[in-house]
Amino acid sequence: MTRFPDQFLPGQRPFLIAEMSGNHNGDIDRARRLIDAARDCGADAVKIQTYTADTITMNVDRPEFRLEGGLWAGKTLYELYQEAHTPWDWHEALFAHARDAGIALFSSPFDPTAIDLLESLNTPAYKIASFELIDLPLIAKAAATGKPLIMSTGMASLGEIAEAVATAQDAGNTNITLLHCVSGYPTPVEDCDLRTIPHMAQAFNLPVGLSDHTMGVAVPVAAVALGAIIIEKHFTLARADGGPDCAFSLEPAEFKAMAEACRVAHAALGTVSYALKASEAGGRTFRRSLYIDRDVPAGTVLTAADIRSIRPGLGLAPKYLPDVLGQTAARDLTRGEPVSWTMLGKAP
């Protein structure tokens, strides 16, 4: 079974989270299939979201409650969240299914009652969504559980991130991971600014990952190369099935390709090293070196016409060419011989 880490550490193998969000489309059997598919595609954990339309907003049709433009244009917030929420009476069944399936399941709480529900189900961790990063009382309650706390930073200023981190730490939690995030749905690649990842890690002395809303898998792989230790990506069985988040969600084959590429990228990072690798040791023989380029009688003063820098590498290194030129052949030399100090003598 995939176990949720007790703590995320810089440099660790990337932990891959499949965000279900509302892609269950109101069908608990589909939610179960999403959990199974995420496991089969290489995800380390599945994340859901714990709210109801009434705990996250109000059923009010004022202009500020209606969405303009984008994927959800024309809906009220209440209508969107009524469609996208994961019913609370599913939670126990989904946590049990994930345990049986051998994959970790956790959630984003959106109000204090959601934390109470998730605590009753022994969630292994909490995720604070970007839009909730400024809800410091919510962060304090989640942090006070002592469980790993992952916080997305979409739309947040450096100061707001600092307030969120300080709030969690003041609640006694030092097990904090930040996720660089751009809250655009979908996010244009040019908005990603992935160089923020190492800067954020240095600024807060915390491990940092990526919550990604771009199309495709290139951005997560690049993030791993920059040190991201978590990758969170929305996941669906098929975009053609529709759903509130389907447009920027990965299908199973895409998620699997991302998982494999991220892990290859991490393995390739390795450490700072200039040592000869076992895989290249045999290649040293085929580096360039100095060879006799024509038959030379003993006593001949060697010139550039007599010596070439070629492959393979059994002769003197090319850097010694100036030292070799002008010396005499100590014996008859044959074209194709590697140059060595023993075949050279002083000029008469």
Image (cartoon, grey):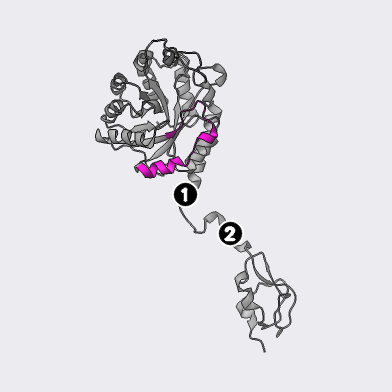
Q: Quadrant of residue 112?
A: top left
The one of 192 and 256 positioned closer to us in this rendering = 192
Give percent across and percent down for residue 84. 44, 16
Residue name at image x 47 percent, y 49 percent: 270
Q: Is residue 205 above or below residue 146?
A: below
Residue pointed to by mark 2: 282
Gap in angstroms between the C-alphas marked 1 and 2: 21 Å
Q: Quadrant of the C terminus?
A: bottom right
Label 1 is placed on what type of residue?
Gly
Between 338 and 166, the one nearer to me in the picture: 166
- Dot 2 lies on which element? helix
**Which x, y percent locates residue 272?**
46, 54
Amino acid type at image mark 2: Gly
Dot 1 or dot 2: first in sequence order is 1
Extreme residue in the bottom direction: 348
Question: Does the stretch in magenta take in 198?
Answer: yes
Q: What is the total number of numbered labels drawn onto the structure image?
A: 2
Is 40 included in the stretch rendered in magenta?
Answer: no
**Residue 260 in view (yes/no):** no
Specify the label residue 283 is tagged with. Answer: none
Dot 2 alpha-carbon crowd within 10 angstroms: few under 14, some 14 to 19, many 20 or more: few
Identity of the residue drawn at 51% across and 34% down: 191
| Label 1 element class | loop
Residue located 49% across and 45% down the image: 267
Circle nearer the viewer, 1 or 2:
1
Task: State the quadrant of the N terminus.
Answer: top left
**Relative side of 140 to 231, left or right:** left
In the picture of the structure, the residue carrying the numbered disc 1 is 270
- At x 51%, y 42%, the residue is 265
Q: Which span is picked out in magenta?
A: 180-203
